[in-house]
């Protein structure tokens, strides 16, 4: 096994220490595209649906929101886009950190601390909350390529196949 080092100085503390590479910071664009006013706190993650018609956002305010963007492709979204909340998913006990759309966009995964929820994107209903196998915050969610399940990874160093 090889180990690579990436020199960086960062401003994050605690569990998120090491997430910001200061060498890249100056290369990142600093243009506000849209302010998601329905959220009442920081937005921590965003993910486009595969068809480009919806954007999901995860927030420190313990909610995830599915936004109807009105565009037919993600690259068409611009600073004056009229995005409207399609569903506000509030049944989270802690801030929402991760999001992942199913291959057919029918299910959205969200994670809140060590909890994972599956949401029906047509109705906004929570369709499943699997047993919390993680013992610490879930930091990654990804659907299997064939859509038959998903995997999660967390600060507990576990990767779980669901």
Image (tube, rainbow, N blue to C red):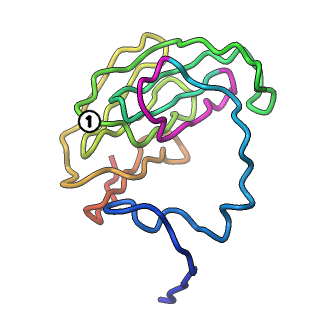
Residue at screen point 34% across, 52% down:
161
Q: In terms of image quadrants, where is residue 109?
A: top left
Residue 85 vs residue 96: left or right? right
Quarter occupied by residue 60: top left
**Image height of 108 relative to 44, above or below:** above
Instruction: From the viewer's side, name the closer residue of 159 and 4.
Output: 4
What's the magenta bit mostly, secondary-structure-wise?
loop
* Residue 31 at x, y percent in the picture: 73, 39
- Would residue 16 be found to the left or right of residue 23 on screen? left
Instruction: Tell me, yes or no, whether the highlighted magenta stretch contains residue 51.
Output: yes
Disc 1 target residue: 94
Count of labels shown?
Answer: 1
In this view, 101 is above or below 29: above
Secondary structure beneath disc 1? loop
The answer to which of 87 and 119 lies nearer the viewer is 87
Q: Is residue 153 magenta?
A: no
Q: Residue lying at the far bottom in this picture: please name it.
A: 2
Q: Residue at x 74, y 18 (%)?
A: 81
At a point 28% along the width and 29% down the height, the residue shown is: 92
Looking at the picture, how far across and down is residue 158, in whole percent? 29, 62
Look at the image and give the residue range highlighted in magenta: 38-53
Residue density around tag 1, few if under 14, some if 14–19, many if 20 or more, within 10 Å: some
Looking at the image, residue 101 lies above or below residue 13: above
Residue 32, x across and y down, in percent: 69, 34
């Amino acid at each position: 096994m090889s180990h690579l080092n990436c020199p960086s100085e960062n401003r994050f503390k605690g569990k998120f220490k090491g997430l910001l590479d200061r060498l890249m910071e100056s290369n990142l664009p600093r243009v506000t595209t849209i302010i998601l006013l329905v959220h009442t706190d920081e937005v921590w993650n965003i993910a486009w649906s595969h068809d480009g018609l919806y954007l999901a956002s995860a927030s420190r305010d313990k909610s995830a929101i599915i936004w109807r963007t009105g565009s037919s492709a993600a690259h068409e979204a611009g600073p004056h886009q009229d995005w409207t909340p399609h569903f506000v998913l509030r049944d989270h006990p802690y801030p929402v950190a991760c999001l992942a759309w199913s291959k057919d966009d029918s299910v959205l995964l969200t994670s809140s601390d060590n909890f994972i929820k599956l949401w029906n994107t047509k109705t906004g209903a929570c369709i499943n909350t699997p047993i919390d196998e993680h013992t610490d915050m879930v930091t990654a969610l990804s659907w299997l390529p064939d859509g038959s399940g998903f995997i999660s990874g967390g600060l507990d160093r576990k990767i779980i196949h669901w």
